[in-house]
Image: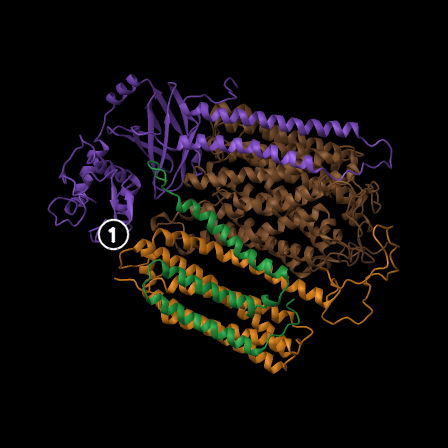
Chain colours: A brown, B purple, C orange, D green
């Protein structure tokens, strides 16, 4: 007889759609997020096809503008922001802290329905003709000039924001109130620390963008004039409010990925993290200082030079905690017992690409240099190194690492390694040329471009083709593994952590008996109380 | 097919070398740290690979000395970047006195420029080399951004206010002009060329064009036709302040505050006259918002400006400045 | 934290526990005497109460930031045009605003006393009475707001193509009224949601669901209601009172 | 901890009285022209009233330190938004000749 676990405990569609189990909700999110990822990828593919030739010959300018707008909206709000928190965080945080569920299971389910509703609004906007404002919704173009479905898309973003808020709220309360006996803050897995920091951003930042896009919708629909220059309104104020959320939102994407990398590096080096408290506090530092840097998006947008200096300074400061993390991860591998399984390959990819992505961010924080680089492909390359090279690498690495736990099945490791390689090579081929194009001066969001940028764009499109293979492969073998994969033991990696103490897949209440925690995670060698913890 | 593929943009302005200086410094830092991390990761992965199934890593928890090292050193490097970036930005931000001024108006989807001698251009800009050129830019509709990669300069053009951009071209040639802020359907078509010319050629080019009125002269006509002259003149019971010698002076307002009469102030006084009332006057002026276009606003400003220059066109109100206004 | 966790008989780290025998489709039932309102994933009522109140406070923080965006707009535009805002504010009816402030403060008092009634296991009638009083005051607030909005409509003070302004600062006045409608409109929407919540709480109280051992829903809804009151405490002076000594 | 503490009714009435007095004061103060002081007085009274509601009606006075931190953090972040956001608006036009 098969033992009862969260997957076979309850049959039928209703048992999934009305579930309050955080693990099942995580799978609902996984399905919907995967859908939006491939939808966003489809838009990206259309963009890359158009940019093969300098002339705008594949689609009209309007269609192209809608493609990059929908790519941005879908990828940012419907994939990257919920990806790791709502799937892996949702699944793992209660297990990692030894709880039966998140603090508010019904709110957790509600957040998924809100996400779906927001997604439906966005799909409606896409299918009824699209939006062409760019994912940034800059006024006065979005309020006065754009001739597309701005209100529907803005409402989609507004609604999805609440999904994000509720997830963050749930995580914060859960981490504060639901930890198992003995699980002190400094015994928490770093994955949990990272999600705690992420949740802070979700609850403090998201409401601001919610009200901002609502004001855009109100200005369009009801002719209120909050950002209208004719009434003394300031388009730059929109940008302030927009980036107050949207810059920290980058940390919503990257912090959970950093949490994943912390876990993977420890598990596959069989070694506890180097400088635990530095990694833990650097997550909080990134979340907090990350709120003070938004003005570096508007150095040349008419912001005063002195405000620019403050923002520039703080932007350099926020780079330090990220640097600390990278150095600590590298030091963790030192004298480890390293195995290059597919999750570790993704972690290595993350380390390299995030380092480049982070350092090129400094180019844009330097005011004098940003004048030239602002709104060029350099910016596009930089944030794709962070979001695709960082966040998606982390997401895929985490998915591979915990897949046996989530499904109870092993995936084919050879294919996984091959896919990881394809992602790494394809990614670099896609986005490295964009740094060069950007410094040459190619502006972003261009439907047609001068001839001299063509070589770089062709390379980029080639890379995107390789990358797409790297993304489709895992979906194929993951699906295959559910039906035909080998059964996974509770701890297929020989890793340490509460999630590996319970069967794969876990029972509905996560643990048969509430665990009592006596030390931190990933203690492989006999612990000597030396150095700093 | 691919005969023309540069990997580095031309340096065609005095600013370009400064910007490239920071760029090369940061590329070096990025290359150093990226290669360092990559090399260490690969080295450790090979040297400490798992040799048998149950092997575990060493119990190392951390090192305060190392943490301080890799906190302080990156911090100091970033502070160099910060200071260097601010220095270059500040220099590129402040236009030098006596720069040649050109008015630029962006609209969906074209750039319109007008030189001070009246010559107009669309999607082209001719400038002399070796002389600072200051663009005073406004927008008729949405956000745009005026961008010349070869000069390394860019500034957003914002409806409702002016933005300034300046450069000194150093190398004759033809360079791309792009709109860098997304502005709708034909955003990627809002491009043009900047021609940097030897000063003598530039003079010849200026002379060869069919110049319309100078902006100041066009502004003077508007000053008459819009009825400004009814109040802003000698003997109109001083319903409005005389505009002679106003430009560039410090104006005392009713609230007691003072403001320097620059382009932004004059613009505001035309479209939103109640915002800053000059001391001693009644707030009776109606708004001209919607009655004059962005280009006409710039012409009116040029006219007001001409009243303050010694050789200005004079005209109405050319009386001695009444003390403070 | 995590007070009152049940003692477990197994220690971490340890082997994977063998599952107890299951009959398919059933859960392990709680066997000993829990409060009937204790949800399965909490160990104690205290833990459950703490989680709920913390959750509501975290939600209120998001609400602060939600209104914060609007207050930021107000701050920027009022700084840019203080006289225009004063002129525009002069056309708001201070009396109605003050009456509504009092109404909301009284409703906060009745709400607080409603929570106290549940806390002290007062009879359901008393609990329901306080909640109904709170709802009545909330409805009165919305009624006054409706009168004010109607007045603005008839006087062409609604921003948009029909906006008319005879004063000196038409642009700033229209901006002020844009903010006025956004801020008070969003606040009124919160009042409407609050009324919905109170309706549910009232029914629960009527069904004798609350007593000294279990009153978290009342407490948490009360937090929300008071928050909406606090927003108005700031909106009233910032919108109604800045034109007090404005001279034509 | 908020659970369990039952404040006396008299306290609620006293706080209520203070709130009403605050409302009357703020209306009265608005009628006196004090220049920029008007804003300060107005906001000081509003902040006091809000603090009273938070401490007593919302029971923060008897709540855990975590609740204090959470409640404060909302207002703190608001100040970040206002404070850093306004650095731009307050320092515009400080550099002559740049028009920004």
Q: Residue B313 occupies which quadrant of the picture?
A: top left
Q: Quadrant of the N terminus of chain A?
A: bottom right
Please determine whether, in this image, residue C154 is positioned above or below residue D90. below
Residue displayed at 47% across by 43% down: A133
Q: In the rendering, at what x and y percent does residue C60 appear? A: 56, 60
How many labels were placed on the picture?
1
For label 1, the SS is: loop
What residue is disc 1 on?
A: B254
> Along the line of sight, which residue is nearer the eye, A284 or B72?
B72
Dot 1 falls on which chain? B
At 66% from the left and 58% from the top, the residue drawn is A173
Q: Label 1 crowding class (10 Å Cα cut-off): few <14, some 14-19, many 20+?
A: some
Q: Say if residue A145 shows up in the picture.
A: yes
In which quadrant will I find the C terminus of chain A? Answer: top right
In the rendered structure, the answer to whether residue B297 lies left or right of residue C149 reads left
**On the picture, is A48 further left or further right than A400?**
left
Left or right: A10 with respect to A318? right
Q: Is residue A146 visible from the viewing direction of this image?
A: no
The residue under the point 60% across, 82% down is: C125
Q: Is residue C31 left or right of residue B284?
A: right
| Picture coordinates of residue D2, whole percent (x, y) | 63, 68
Quarter assignment of residue C223: bottom right
The residue sitting at the left extreme is: B235
């Amino acid at each position: 007889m098969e033992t009862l676990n969260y997957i076979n405990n309850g049959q039928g569609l209703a048992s999934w759609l009305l579930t309050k189990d955080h693990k099942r909700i995580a799978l609902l999110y996984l399905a919907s997020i995967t859908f939006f990822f491939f939808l966003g990828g489809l838009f990206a593919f259309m963009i890359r096809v158009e940019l093969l030739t300098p002339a705008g010959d594949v689609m009209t300018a309007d269609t192209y503008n809608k493609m990059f707008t929908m790519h941005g909206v879908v990828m940012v709000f419907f994939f990257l922001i919920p990806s790791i928190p709502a799937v892996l965080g949702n699944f793992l945080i209660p297990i990692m802290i030894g709880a039966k569920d998140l603090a508010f299971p019904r709110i957790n389910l509600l957040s998924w329905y809100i996400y779906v509703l927001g997604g439906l609004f966005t799909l409606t906007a896409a299918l009824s003709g699209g939006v062409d404002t760019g994912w940034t919704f800059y006024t006065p173009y979005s309020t006065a000039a754009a001739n597309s479905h701005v209100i529907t898309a803005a409402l989609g973003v507004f609604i999805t924001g609440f999904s994000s808020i509720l997830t963050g709220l749930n995580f914060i309360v859960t981490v504060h109130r639901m930890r198992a006996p003995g699980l002190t803050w400094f015994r928490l897995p770093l994955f949990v620390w990272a999600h705690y920091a992420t949740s802070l951003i979700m609850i403090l930042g998201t409401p601001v963008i919610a009200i901002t896009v609502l004001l855009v919708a109100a200005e369009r629909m009801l002719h209120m004039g909050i950002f209208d220059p004719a009434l003394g309104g300031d388009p730059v104020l929109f940008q302030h409010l927009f980036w107050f959320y949207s810059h920290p939102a980058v940390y919503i994407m990257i912090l959970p990925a950093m949490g994943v990398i912390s876990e993977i590096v420890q598990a596959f080096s069989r070694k506890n993290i180097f400088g635990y408290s530095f990694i833990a506090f650097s997550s909080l530092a990134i979340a907090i200082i990350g709120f003070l840097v938004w003005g570096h998006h508007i150095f040349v947008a008419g912001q005063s030079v002195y405000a620019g200096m403050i923002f520039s300074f703080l932007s350099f400061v926020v780079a330090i905690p990220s640097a600390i993390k990278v150095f600590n991860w590298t030091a963790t591998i030192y004298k480890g017992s390293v195995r290059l399984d597919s999750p570790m390959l993704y972690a290595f990819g993350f380390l390299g690409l995030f380092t480049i992505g982070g350092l090129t961010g400094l180019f844009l924080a330097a005011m004098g240099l940003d004048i030239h680089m602002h709104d060029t492909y350099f910016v596009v390359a930089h944030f794709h190194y962070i979001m695709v090279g960082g966040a998606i690498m982390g997401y895929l690495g985490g998915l591979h690492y915990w897949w046996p736990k989530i499904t109870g099945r092993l995936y084919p490791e050879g294919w996984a390694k091959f896919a990881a390689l394809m992602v790494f090579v394809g990614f670099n081929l896609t986005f490295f040329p964009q740094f060069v194009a950007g410094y040459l001066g190619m502006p972003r969001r261009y439907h047609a471009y001068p001839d001299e940028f063509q070589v770089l764009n062709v390379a980029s499109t080639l890379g995107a083709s390789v990358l797409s293979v790297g993304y489709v492969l895992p979906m194929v073998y993951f699906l295959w593994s559910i039906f035909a994969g080998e059964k996974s033991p509770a701890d297929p990696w020989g890793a340490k952590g509460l999630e590996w103490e319970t069967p794969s897949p876990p029972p509905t209440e996560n643990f048969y008996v509430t665990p009592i925690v006596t030390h931190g995670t990933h203690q492989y060698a006999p612990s000597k109380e030396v150095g700093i913890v | 097919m691919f005969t023309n593929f540069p990997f580095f943009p031309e340096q065609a302005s005095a600013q370009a070398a400064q910007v490239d200086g920071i760029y090369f410094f940061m590329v070096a830092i990025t290359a150093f740290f990226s290669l360092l991390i990559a090399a260490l990761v690969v080295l450790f992965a090979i040297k400490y690979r798992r040799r048998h199934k149950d092997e575990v890593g060493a119990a190392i928890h951390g090192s305060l000395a190392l943490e301080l090292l890799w906190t302080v050193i990156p911090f100091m490097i970033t502070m160099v970047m910060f200071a260097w970036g601010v220095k270059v930005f500040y220099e590129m931000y402040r236009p030098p006195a006596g720069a040649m001024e050109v008015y630029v108006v962006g609209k969906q989807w074209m750039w319109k420029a007008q030189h001070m001698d009246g010559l107009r251009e669309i999607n082209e800009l001719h400038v002399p080399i070796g002389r600072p050129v200051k663009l005073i830019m406004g927008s008729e509709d949405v956000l745009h951004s005026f961008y010349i990669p070869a000069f390394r300069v860019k500034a957003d053009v914002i409806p409702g206010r002016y933005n300034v951009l300046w450069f000194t071209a150093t190398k004759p040639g033809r360079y791309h002009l792009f709109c860098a802020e997304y502005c709708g359907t034909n955003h990627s078509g809002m491009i043009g060329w900047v021609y940097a010319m030897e000063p003598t050629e530039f003079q010849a080019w200026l002379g060869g064009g069919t110049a319309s009125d100078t902006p100041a002269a066009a502004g003077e006509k508007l000053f008459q036709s819009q009825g400004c002259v009814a109040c802003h003149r000698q003997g109109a019971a001083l319903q409005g302040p005389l505009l002679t010698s106003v430009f560039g002076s410090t104006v005392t307002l009713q609230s007691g505050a003072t403001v320097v009469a620059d382009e932004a102030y004059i613009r505001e006084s035309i479209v939103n006259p109640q915002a800053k009332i000059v001391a001693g006057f009644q707030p009776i002026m109606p708004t001209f918002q919607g009655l004059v276009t962005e280009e006409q606003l710039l012409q009116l400003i040029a006219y007001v400006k001409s009243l303050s220059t010694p050789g200005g066109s004079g005209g109405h109100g050319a009386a001695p400045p009444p003390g403070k206004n | 934290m995590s007070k009152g966790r049940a003692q477990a008989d197994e220690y971490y780290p340890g082997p994977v526990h063998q599952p107890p025998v299951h009959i398919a489709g059933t859960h392990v039932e709680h066997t000993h005497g829990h409060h009937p309102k204790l949800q399965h994933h909490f160990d104690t009522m205290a833990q459950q109460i703490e989680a709920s109140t913390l959750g509501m406070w975290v939600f209120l923080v998001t609400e602060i930031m939600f209104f914060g965006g609007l207050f930021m707009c107000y701050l920027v535009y009022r700084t840019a045009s203080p006289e225009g805002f004063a002129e525009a504010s002069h056309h708001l009816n201070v009396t109605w605003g003050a009456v509504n402030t009092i109404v909301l403060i009284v409703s906060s008092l009745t709400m607080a006393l409603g929570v106290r009634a549940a806390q002290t296991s007062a009879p359901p009638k008393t609990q329901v009475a306080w909640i109904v009083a709170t709802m009545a005051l909330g409805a009165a607030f919305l009624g006054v707001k409706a009168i004010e909005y109607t007045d603005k409509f008839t006087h062409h003070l609604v921003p948009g193509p029909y906006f008319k302004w005879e004063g000196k600062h038409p642009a700033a006045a229209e901006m002020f009224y844009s903010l006025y409608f956004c801020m008070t409109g969003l606040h009124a929407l919160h009042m409407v949601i609050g009324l919905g919540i109170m309706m549910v709480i009232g029914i629960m109280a009527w069904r004798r669901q609350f007593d000294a051992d279990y009153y978290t829903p009342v407490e948490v809804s009360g937090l929300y209601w008071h928050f909406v009151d606090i927003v108005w405490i700031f909106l009233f002076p910032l919108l109604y009172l800045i034109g007090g000594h404005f001279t034509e | 901890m908020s659970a369990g503490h039952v404040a006396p009714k008299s306290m609620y009435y006293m706080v209520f009285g203070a709130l009403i007095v605050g409302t009357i004061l703020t209306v009265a103060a608005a009628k006196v022209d004090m220049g920029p002081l008007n804003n300060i007085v107005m906001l000081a009274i509003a902040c006091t009233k809000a603090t009273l509601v938070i401490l007593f009606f919302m029971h923060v006075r008897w709540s855990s330190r975590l609740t204090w931190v959470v409640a404060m953090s909302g207002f703190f972040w608001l100040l970040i938004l206002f404070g850093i956001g306004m650095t731009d608006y307050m320092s515009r036009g400080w550099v002559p000749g740049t028009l920004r």
